[in-house]
Image (cartoon, helix red, strand yellow):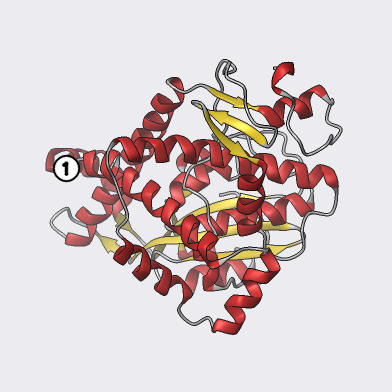
Amino acid sequence: MNFVPTAQRCSRPALLLLLALAGMAGACQGKPAAPPVSADAWAVVNGREITREDVERAFRRNLQGPPPASDEETATAKLEVLDQLIVQDLLLAKAREAKIDVPDTELDAAYAEARKGITDEAFAQELARRNLTAADMRDGLRRDMLVQKLSEREVASKVVVTDQEIAAYFEANRAQFNRTEDAYRIAQIVITPVRDARTANRTGNDATTPQEAAFKVRMVMDRLKAGASFAEVAADFSEDPESAPRGGDLGYVPLSALQKAPPPLREAVLTATPGSAKLLSGGGAHTVVLVVAKDVAGQKDLSMPEVKAAITQGLRDRREQLLRAAFLGAIRNDAVVVNLMARRLVEAQGKVPSVAPAAAGTR
């Protein structure tokens, strides 16, 4: 196990359920599109513009606490948001093709649930702080729900785990089901404030300063609270090279090993309800810990419902992760994407230029 020592748990307002972007991220590449674009365009996706205001609005939805300290850190954060909007645009276009919709009644219910426990005054203050409107919040939530529905239709609904596969897994891993002590299956998302020697997540994303780490963990928590798969977020953004490729999964950790872990981590695991995630932060580093399940000591048998359910869920998670990555890769293959802002920053050799994108004639 590669736990990052951390301190206290951080709490977040339920409002952030409205602020998260879609469950996937990463930049799409393709040949530059020929048609002219407006001066306000930061990217063009299959002929559709993503404007400066689109990025600014999404950036403000993500923002929690003070903004990044420097122009470079702000530009880096906005590039990440732009990448996420590019992928979201591709997914929303796919949802339109599939005639997927979010009825107003469904959106109203989700919006009310997200605002539960927040007074009108507190909500208005939060909107003012972020320079957003209630309509902006509803639109962000609608987009997230469309992407989630698309994922359920094109990925989750197509994953099937058979009884034969479950039995084969049990036979191949029988020793794992004979425990001499209680154990907890744990997953993690690690974010550090320093450049890592090896980055194994799918997006190559690596926070290198405390400010970048703080911004990144806010984005990660927003995604999780919006319903994104923990395994997918870990695979995309965790900076632990050992567990990131496995969706953050650390497997079952015996109670005796947990007793030797740092107290905040130990208490977070031992007091957690399976399925819940907790954020531990300290020294500029952050670890999101998910307790997947608890397994008591003793010999397990495939006839036990909890054993079959655990194997089924594990196999489904791995297959969904693979299918989701393949689905997104297939969409990217057919896309023509021009990231104008990224190109301008490259041309400026990392110096933050004007926020306006490169003129169409320079492409």
**Dot 1: what SS?**
helix
Q: Looking at the picture, how far across and down is residue 81, in whole percent?
A: 62, 44
Marks counted in the figure total 1
* Relative horizontal placement of residue 4, taking residue 166 as reference (left or right): right
Q: Which residue is mark 1?
A: 167
* Relative horizontal placement of residue 328, taking residue 221 as reference (left or right): left
Q: Is residue 230 above or below residue 275?
A: above
Q: Looking at the picture, how far across and down is residue 60, in whole percent?
A: 66, 57
Tell me the crowding category of disc 1: few under 14, some 14 to 19, or many 20 or more residues within 10 angstroms, Cα based: some
Q: Is residue 112 above or below residue 176?
A: below
Which residue is at a point 13% across and 38% down the rendered structure image?
Answer: 164
Q: Looking at the picture, how far across and down is residue 277, in whole percent?
A: 49, 64
Which residue is at a point 74% across and 24% down the rendered structure image?
Answer: 359
Residue 123 showing in the rendered view: yes
Q: 279 and 296: which one is in front?
A: 279
Q: Looking at the picture, how far across and down is residue 310, in whole percent?
A: 27, 54
Res 303 → quadrant: bottom left
Under mark 1, the amino acid is Ala
Which residue is at a point 72% across and 17% down the rendered structure image?
Answer: 361
Q: Is residue 92 above or below residue 259?
A: above
Residue 194 showing in the rendered view: no
Which residue is at a point 72% across and 25% down the rendered structure image?
Answer: 343
* Relative horizontal placement of residue 6, taking residue 209 as reference (left or right): left
